Amino acid sequence: MKSLSEFFNMGGYALYVWGSFGVTALLMIIEPILVRQRRKTALQRISRLIRIKSEQNS
Amino acid sequence: MVNIFKFSSPATFYPLAGKIARISTWIAVLLLAIGLYMSFFVAPTDYKQGEGYRIIFIHVPAAWMSMFIYVVMAFWAGVGLVFNTRLSSMMAQALAPTGAIMTFIALWTGAFWGKPMWGAWWVWDARLTSELILFFLYIGFIALQGAIDDNRRADRAGAVLLLVGVVNIPIIYFSVKWWNTLHQGASVSIKNGSSMSTIMLQTMLIMTFAFWAYSIAVALYRVRSIILEREKDARWVSELPEIRR
């Protein structure tokens, strides 16, 4: 098998190959994190809404 | 038929979306692992483009997804416009950010492929320009939805924008045939089969399915949040086990 540095060098195309795969990986990590945050915020807002409602009723 | 209408209710779709999203996540992780391994260790070096060609293993799937997601989005928005179904409009809204990201990836990786192969990051080629317009359509849709406070009005305005923008999809797809500019023709087509080596094609298809599963998972997780946001006053929402009281 080729050496590690040879692998990262990508036959001279390192900037282009890793620039492409790197940014794609970054976006595909950030997007699920944002989606998870949105869910958390939504759940928190709903539980606050329910608390306010139950306080008004009591 | 009964089942279709049953799942068009947000209350029944919410748990179903969660289930499908979880399965899709695992499929995406598995296929991405296999696809990346094949992209770097199994697929041989290209005789003309060296290692630089490996970019196509994400470029082509992302470009396909960018168009496919748009069509699915426009379909749901259209259904929402005609039948006034809330859930279909929410589905369209949930797909938009993922579609925009796929379009951005297609443009970005295209630039990083174009620089060493064509000698330019960007050219005003027909394919590139129409793909850039697709990106603006996604951004425009997201901005429009965000700008209108009333959900129903936002859905309708967004649907009109999406349906008008559909004309751009065949333009992107056939641009390499209609205008003889820089971007090469399709490597894989229904009529002519594939001009790539089998292992390269297999790698690209696995990556495509991985992107597919990823998009389904993210969009369904997002639609669950959109359902919660819009149905926050509904009784079934307040009775969900994940809500802390």
Image (cartoon, rainbow, N blue to C red):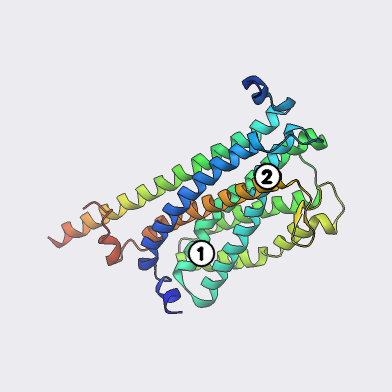
Figure quadrant of residue B229: bottom left
- Judging by the rendered image, the residue that carries numbered circle 1 is B154
| Chain identity of mark 1 | B
- Please tell me how crowded label 2 is: few (under 14), some (14-19), or many (20+) other residues with Cα within 10 Å: many
Please, what secondary structure does the residue beneath circle 2 have?
helix
* Farthest left residue in view: A58
Task: Report the mark closest to the observer, 1 or 2.
Answer: 2
Mark 1 and mark 2 lie on one chain; the one further toward the N terminus is 2
Question: Label 1 to label 2, Cα distance in Å?
Answer: 32 Å
Tell me: B178 left or right of B99: right
Q: From where the camera sits, is residue B97 visible?
A: no
- Could you tell me which residue is drawn at 56 percent across and 49 percent down? B210
Name the residue: 55% across, 51% down. Answer: B98
Can you identify the residue that label 2 sits on?
A: B59
Residue B157's x, y, as percent? 56, 66
- The foreground one among B74 and B148 is B74
Residue B61 is left or right of residue A28, and the answer is right
Question: Based on the displayed image, in which of its 4 quarters is residue A6 positioned?
Answer: top right
Q: Is residue B4 above or below residue B167?
A: below
Q: Is residue B225 above or below residue B111?
A: below
Percent position of residue A4, x then y: 62, 21
Which residue: 54% across, 72% down? B79
Amino acid of disc 2: His
Q: Position of residue B32 (x, y in %)?
A: 55, 43
Are dots 1 and 2 on a single chain? Answer: yes
- Total number of numbered labels? 2
Tell me, yes or no, whether the two marked residues, 1 and 2, touch with CB atoms within 8 Å. Answer: no
Q: Chain of mark 2?
A: B
